[in-house]
Image (spheres, rainbow, N blue to C red):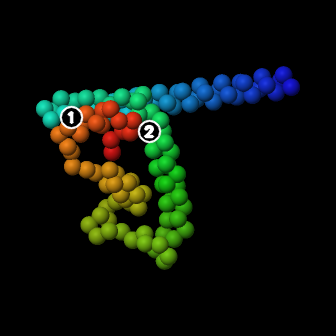
Amino acid sequence: MESHLMKLAAAIASSLEKFSERAQCFIYQYGNFTIPDPDGKKHYLNGIRTLGENIADNGGIRKTYWAWFERYLSDPQSTYYNNKRLQGLEEYSPEQMFFIQYARTWCTQPNPEGYKKALADVHSPG
């Protein structure tokens, strides 16, 4: 029993260490995003404040992408699903179009005071 608990404790410690390393990557990456104020001064996001939502959003888009990709591979000729290329955007691969569409959902017109809200929010902007 003691041996089993020791192995379990080691596995938990290893998982926590790996999670911490990956979390630091998210903190660094999102903490380097800047938002300009109306005067053009850049303000850095707080990567620690947004960490939980950033992990959730990244996991969500990863799962969504793989679900879309599996469906795309099941019907690349668009027999059952609409996988056709959009006129004028033929230069982009289907994979690139997936991410362009995802990014498009976050496009908004900037609000002069919106940067204050974005800096205080637990969600990273767009």
Q: Which residue is mark 1?
A: 36
Which quadrant of the figure has residue 8? top right
Q: What's the residue at 18%, 29% (across, down)?
A: 41
Which residue is under mark 2? 54
What is the spatial separation of the Cα atoms under label 2 and label 1, in whole angstroms? 20 Å
Q: Measuring from the top left, give residue 53's x and y in whole percent.
A: 45, 39
- The relative height of residue 94 versus residue 52 in the rendered view (above or below) is below
108 vs 38, left or right, is right
Identify which amino acid the numbered label 2 is placed on: Asn
Instruction: In this rendered view, identify the residue nearer to me: 88 or 57.
Output: 57
**Whether residue 1 is situated above or below residue 36 in the rendered picture:** above
Answer with the quarter of the image where residue 48 lies. top left
Q: Which amino acid does the dot numbered 1 rest on?
A: Pro
- Residue 73 placed where, x, y %? 52, 65
Q: Please name the residue shown 26% across and 66% down the image.
A: 88
Q: Is residue 96 visible?
A: no
Q: Residue at x 71, y 24 (%)?
A: 10
Residue at 47 percent across and 27 percent down: it is: 24
Image check: 42 left or right of 50? left
